[in-house]
Image (cartoon, coloured by chain):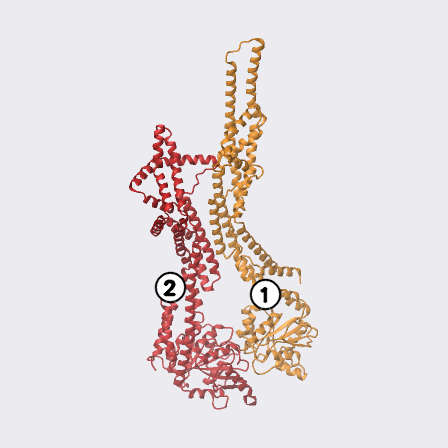
Amino acid sequence: MPSSLREAIDFLERLSRYDGPWRALRLEGPLLARRVSELRERAEHLHDVLVVAMVGGSGVGKSTFLNALAGDTLAKTSPYRPCTTHPTVYAPPGVRLPFEGWTHTTGSALEHLVIVDTPDSDSIALEHRERAVEVLRQADLVMICGSMEKYLDEATWSLLRPLREERAFVCIETKAGPDESIRAHWLGRLEEQGFQVDRYFRVNALKTYDRKLRSGAPEPEEYDFPALEQYLQEELTAERIERIKRSNVSGLLRKTSGRLAEIAGGAEPVIDSLEARFEAAERELAKTSFAVVEERLFKENHLWSFALGREVGLRAKGIVGTAGRALEAMRTLPARLGSWLPGLRRSDTGKHAAGLMAAEPLFAEDLDAATGEIVSLYQRQRSAITLDLARSGLTEHEVDATTHAFEEALNARVSQVLRGPARDAVVRRARMLTGWPVTLLCDVPLAALILFSAYRMVDAYFFGADLPAQFISLSIMVLLLALAVELAAMGIAARVMAWSARRQALQSLRVAFLSPGLAFQNERAVLDGIRTQIDLIKRIARAVV
Amino acid sequence: MSGAAPQYEMIAAFRHAFGQLFDAMQSHPVFAGEMFTGTEAWLPLMDYKLAAEPSAPECLVIAIAGGTNTGKSTVFNLMLGGKYSAVRSTAAATCRPLAVMPPELASVCLDGRLLPGFLPKAANEAEDTLDRGLHPETLLVADAPGLPDGMVIMDTPDVDSIDQKNWEIANRLRAASDVIIAVLTAEKYQDEKVIQFFREAQALGRVILPVMNKADGANGHEVARAQLEEFVKAARLHHPPCFLVNHDFSLAGNYDPARVMALDGNGSLRDYLLELDATETRAAVREATLRRLVFYAEDFVERCEEQAERVSRLKEEFDERADRMARRYEPLPGAAVGGLFHEFVQSKRGRLDRAIGDASRIVSQGAVVVGRTLSRIVVSRATLESAARDNTEAKLQESHRRQVERLSQELAAGYFDTARNLDPAVSGMVVAGLDRLDTEAAAKCVSTATVKATGVSDDFRHHAERLLERWWDDHRGRRMVIEALDKILLVAPAGIAGVLSVHTAGVGLPEAMIVAGPFMEQFAARVMEYQFGDAMFDFISPWRKEQQEALARALREHIAHPALDEVLQVLDTLEAGPLAELRRTLNQCRQVSVKP
């Protein structure tokens, strides 16, 4: 079997086992599985003998025709209808066929052919019809046998119609006489219904059979019989047989993949619109979640001041820095005190605030950004999506009705922003506030003031200069005043920086929320799965064409 | 024989009822298509033998039928002794029926009175029967002066070729005929389609006369005899006289009626037909046709009734699902429900208490607004969050609204899945109904209808009062606690204000009111509810049930029934009368048919 063919069949087999949410493909499964097994069987026997089935109504002379071909009485014939009850297989010696319950006759001189005489397709013995269908399933080449009265019967045509693209056809007019008119009529009607007939032979089976029994020379009343024999013996070479089988296989493959491509073509726009729908839902969810989280965590200026103050406190140096640290410790005392005092709600505020912006997820369990509002919106969106899927004939098999996945995704995003960009922004600003330039700028005037006072005092002590009264208290007051001014300036700067850090973090949060994959992962996986199947089908369809 | 016989009227009534049902169902083409499939096989029965046609003269209609290319037209011509119908060697050649009759009948027939349902057209030449350009319902009419009075002979298209239109015409002509000549050949006497055709003709009481065409004359027609016997057995005929035509090409063109001769050698088919008692035959045919009609109609009406039954079950199933979905709704009682309890307790106050309570409320109410605002600021500082998110009524309603919309959509999704697995006719209608349904809008309607009703209904108010009254009587201890608490609640704001005024000369009074007012109020309310706790479940559950029922009603109204819209229309149409009328008229027909 050629590898490309095997690949195509393997693809089809995978599709036939499809048990996903795509209803249309699921329904196609059993038919597809039957086709796949037939394709596999046919593809494996490309080099075997050609199975020729003779099909026709009761009494057209199929058995007589077989006898005429063999020149011997292989099959029983009779004027009473129906006569043949079981298929008769006429095969060359040495060919083994897996047809059970059929009469086997070896001894055919036609080396590459197995000819099967089938029971009738149209009599009241309905089991005959079933047997004929069985033979047709095994056949590669169908000889449609017809006579004057029985070439246009629905009973026979209805058997052949489904096989139009999957078998080679040859017409045999079994009781040919001088009147040739049915040839054109028959072929015309066949063509009209989409049959492609390879050859047409007019024979008179009974005459040939009689003559062969007498061992005489061919007579003109046998019409095309010699041509038919030549066709079977010489034209149907091994090469030709393989071509027929190959074309049968490709016909079936084309039909199968065509049907699948039709299904896929119908599903594609649906999938596209669903995808757009999911995206819109996700965007709306992200926007709402952003608004809620912004309102809850990011609007709180004191959280950011707290975080910045903590970072500043860790790095502060110099006079003003140390003083600022002490002041910060006092300022946040109530919040920290909360954890020691009983009865205060959310008493671990300090721990919480520190944990939120810590580099490590210290208190990850504390963070729950998915509030009832967000979750209920998610659930509603999700049910809308489930409805859309159901409307499009897609059903989710395993529905994860919980909201854990979404909540986790949301919290992960918030905490990533808090621990990443938000923390970075805060730390960067803290570094700026506690860096040497700012420290020096703050400390130098104070240091100068202290030094100046010290100099004046030392000078007065050793050289007896007069110090004004209350010099010391005045110096200290000036010093404290300067310190207070600087601390206030620092405080204001810290507030401004906390505010700008918050703004920056907010920007990152918006980006993080709007990046895809926040919600509806399961539903998206459903669509992706179907898209994969559609691509597979398209590939097969292209390969087959 | 006139229309005096009661059966004609009954059949006309049945026919009328059927027509009404048919018309009523035309607005639902898919469903009707499924429902009326198969009726075309027996509807023509009413057109001919069972229809009172006082204007048409009684006649014996003989149809020639059989498989394709068996030589029906040849036998037809032989019977008439001339070339009336074209003969071709190709199959399915005759495609338009030809009726030959005495001239005085022909004019009646051309008026459309003799064989209604066809478009009669005078035949110009024999080849007309092959003309596919003629309207498919055309009946060609020719006159043959030699035919005896009241005899019509018809050539019909085949019953088994790939041109299925031909079968339909043959079926209708079978209904129109009294005698059917079955043309067989050595090849075609056991074909399933052919046998089925004649079995049905036999069941309809038609006189069937098998003719073996192209018979082999060897051994005294031994083969033909056996074949005819097999045919008779297969078609379940009762020993009919059989005929044959010898296989003889040389006689083409020589149309001698005697060539269609009896199997036993006594006379020809034509002779047999001439001797046939037309009145008796017609009576037998009529009787059997009526029986058969009742048989088919019975089956049809039963199927319709089953279908109606299935549709109404579907409605029940959908309603049931809506109810199940509504039971998943879990509304939380808002202030309106909780308030009932406090209302009740307050109603137990004495007159003096009530006056104090009112004064106290007025005092505290002003402070409450300021107090709430201040406490909100304090809490938000302590928790790093704007704590303005308490469960207000608006929030509660919003959450209910979302819950309800979610349930609506889940219900619709479930309906889709169910609808796809129904039988095709109904499934198509339901899926189309669901597709038409704007679920988003429907969900909104449901939520408006339901959430609006979150308030307290009068029923529930009465229930609550009864329950509370009983509880009040049963629980003496708790009742006293509650009464004590109520007293505290009653005097607390005024009391605190009084005490503070005395001690501080008014300093700190507003602050104390701010803190104490709301606190006391809430505290006392919670303790009271706790006292009532074990009765709370009983208290709430009818309210919840009420809410769920409201939701179920809304779900049915806005989702289930719009989705089933067309199906329900079908059900209405079926149940509004046509089906019952059909059943009634059918029963009358049956009574007539079983009468000897």
- Pointer 2 and pointer 1: residues touching (CB < 8 Å)? no
Give the vertical position of B537 relative to B30 (above or below): above
| Whether residue B252 is visible | no
Circle 1 crowding by C-alpha within 10 Å: few under 14, some 14–19, many from 20: few
**Chain for disc number 2:** B
Quote the CA–CA distance across marks 2 and 1.
44 Å
Q: Are marks 2 and 1 on the same chain?
A: no
Q: Amino acid at mark 1?
A: Arg
Name which quarter of the figure residue B559 lies in.
bottom left
Q: Quadrant of the N terminus of chain B?
A: bottom left
Circle 2 crowding by C-alpha within 10 Å: few under 14, some 14–19, many from 20: few
| Residue at the left extreme, as displayed | B351
The front one of B334 and A165 is B334
Q: Quadrant of the C terminus of chain B?
A: bottom left
Q: Amino acid at mark 2?
A: Asp
The front one of B305 and B108 is B305
Q: Nearer the viewer, mark 2 or mark 1?
A: 2
Per the image, label 1 sits on a secondary structure element best described as helix
| Residue at the front extreme, as displayed | B477
| Residue at the bottom extreme, as displayed | B266
Image coordinates for residue A43, horizontal then vertical, percent: 64, 65
**Chain for disc number 1:** A
Give the vertical position of A452 relative to B536 (above or below): above
Per the image, label 2 sits on a secondary structure element best described as helix
Name the residue carrying label 1.
A34
| Whether residue B172 is visible | yes
- Give the letter of the red chain: B
Give the vertical position of B515 relative to A190 (above or below): above
Q: Residue at x 32, y 43 (%)?
A: B349
Name the residue carrying label 2.
B572
Chain A pictured colour: orange
